[in-house]
Amino acid sequence: MLLTLLILLGILALGIGIYLQQPKFGELPAGARLEKIQTSPNYADGQFQNLIPTPQRAEGGSTAALWWEFLVAKKERPAPAESLPAMKPDLLTLDKSQDVVIWLGHSSYFVQLGGKRILIDPVFSSYASPVSFINKAFPGTNPYTAEDMPPIDYLFISHDHWDHLDYPTITALKPKIKNVICGLGVGAYFEQWGFAASQVHEADWLTSLELENDFIVHVLPARHFSGRLLSRNKTLWVGYALVTPERRIFFSGDSGYGPHFRQIGDRLNGFDLVILENGQYDKNWPYIHMMPEEVAQAAEDLKARALLPGHAGKFALANHPWDEPFKRITAATQNKKYRLLTPMIGEPVELGNQQQVFSRWWERVN
């Protein structure tokens, strides 16, 4: 019996090992890429570090208790009971000269800015995990596919978590992508997945990429972590500022609240639009995601003229009602100097239209 058990355990371990070799898990930085990473001021003790101490769970909480609550505790309305409303404008025929942002659900965005077509953290899969039965997308939240996308001048990836870097989406988009912008180390995934090294532009925090005369990308700090398996913080998590002569847009990526927002606002003198994560928060991990009230403050710190909240409305990754982020951010931004933009999935935000109004669409969904 013992021999049989050992054989079965060996077969199981072999099977897991073979499964983990699938390309969707990616490769960690090595060779010259790792040598470059090791020179970063944000890398120490074998991993990237946040600018300020950032525990992944609240003080006094145990990892076991956190996982028990996450996996076992009863959740209140984590997903809608019906399909979410969505629009689907034809991106292939959209006037390229029009500056727009279109929320594609969760943290995915299609952006037209200064004549450039941009995708941010696209996830067109029906789930956000290594396996199809975990983190399923809400009904109605996947109106777009890779086939609906025009040629993409710049693909931006904030970090390597499954709900931001989706292997099936990236491989389907590959023929359409001209350039990839990402944090240090994340380029290893793209090169493994068949992208040419010349297409991939990796950068550290507080550096700038001027790939065209009229388009500057600032790679900026976030307060989070990285890793697709057990290895943590081997690649860098980032936010971005996209700057043209006419517009200034900030995208936070995943980030807990911290002084970096005010520093970024001061450094770049404010933004026409800030796109901030607003969802998948929990009292047990208060440092790596923001509560909606912190999102409202972060927009103020960034000197925003308008706030577009995301990271909600598609996947249930945390124990809060699916519509709570929208309700709380609406309340938290009352009487702020900036505008709150709440488009439904696929509804274009016209960056030159200061009078554009959006409905509270989540109030119509059970």
Image (cartoon, helix red, strand yellow):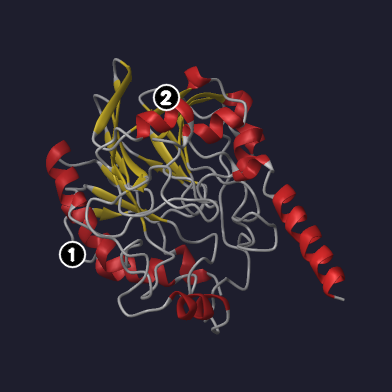
Q: Secondary structure at mark 1?
A: loop
Label whose residue precedes the other's in the sequence (1 or 2): 2
The number of numbered badges drawn on the structure is 2
Image quadrant in which you'd find residue 4: bottom right
Question: From mark 1 to mark 2, how far is it between C-alphas?
Answer: 34 Å
**Image quarter of the N terminus:** bottom right
Residue 181 visible in the shown view: no
Q: Is residue 134 above or below residue 227?
A: below
Asked whether 310 or 253 is in front, the reply is 253
Whether residue 231 sits left or right of residue 45 in the image: it is right
Asked whether 359 or 111 is in front, the reply is 111
Residue 254 visible in the shown view: yes
The residue under label 1 is: 335
Q: Amino acid at mark 2?
A: Lys
Image coordinates of residue 151 in percent, x first then y, are: 56, 24
Q: Amino acid at mark 1?
A: Asn
Asked whether 104 or 202 is in front, the reply is 202
Image coordinates of residue 274 in percent, x first then y, are: 29, 47
Q: Is residue 168 above or below residue 82?
A: above
Q: Secondary structure at mark 2?
A: strand
Q: Which mark is residue 24?
A: none
Which residue is rendered at x = 73% and y = 58% of the image? 13
Q: Residues within 10 Å of mark 1 (few under 14, many from 20)?
A: few
Image coordinates of residue 269 in percent, x first then y, are: 13, 39
Which residue is rendered at x = 25% and y = 27% of the image? 246
Q: Is residue 58 above or below residue 244?
A: below
The residue under label 2 is: 116
**Image quarter of the C terminus:** bottom right
Q: Nearer the viewer, mark 1 or mark 2?
A: 2
Q: Residues within 10 Å of mark 2 (few under 14, many from 20)?
A: some
